[in-house]
Amino acid sequence: MHNAQAIPEQLQQVMQTLEDLRSRAQSANPDGRSLQHRFLTAQQICQQTLLPEAMVRSHLVPHATEITRALRLLAMDVSFLQASRQPMTRQKRQAEICDRCDRLLGYCQAMLAQWDAPPAHPGQNPAES
């Protein structure tokens, strides 16, 4: 298990990488290799540190599940952008990458906000606490 204290910093690093990926995807003619590199960096941090640590914190499992799913879809979006040749197709893929990054950033922000929160007890409404 990794140092749980370092996880929020790594989560911030993932968020910065996703913001950079989104910014690069918004450019007029994004470099596919650069996008792929940014994606792989975020994916590696998530798979090696964030997700394993989140899976042992029951209240973070839903966020970890959504991050895993969104990363898989983002991988496909980046690959499809690299393969696209038509300007309209490229623009559509760029928009999809930006949307996927925004969703991932939202999941990361939610995970960060709840990182140190104690898990809710079964049957307890967190709003009542």
Image: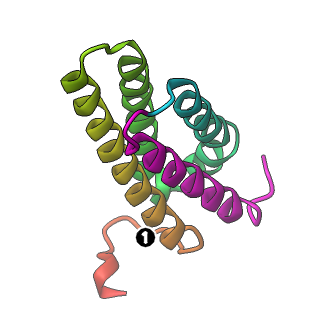
Quadrant where the C terminus is found in the figure: bottom left
Q: Quadrant of residue 76?
A: top left
Tell me how many marks there are.
1
Give coordinates of residue 104: x percent, y percent.
41, 49
Residue at position x 49%, y 54% in the image: 19
Count neighbours of disc 1 (C-alpha within 10 A) and say few if under 14, some if 14 to 19, many if 20 or more: few
Q: Is residue 30 above or below residue 87?
A: below
User: Residue furthest toward the left?
Assistant: 88
Q: Which is more toward the observer, 65 or 89?
A: 89
Q: Is residue 17 left or right of residue 120?
A: right
Give coordinates of residue 54: x percent, y percent.
58, 51
Q: Quadrant of residue 128?
A: bottom left
Which residue is label 1 attached to? 120
Q: Is residue 100 above or below residue 36?
A: below
Q: Is residue 15 left or right of residue 82?
A: right
**SS at badge 1:** loop
The segment highlighted magenta reads 1-29
Residue at position x 54%, y 73% in the image: 118
Residue at position x 58%, y 44% in the image: 51
User: Residue furthest toward the front?
Assistant: 28
Give coordinates of residue 97: x percent, y percent.
35, 38
Q: Which is more toward the observer, 38 or 75?
A: 38
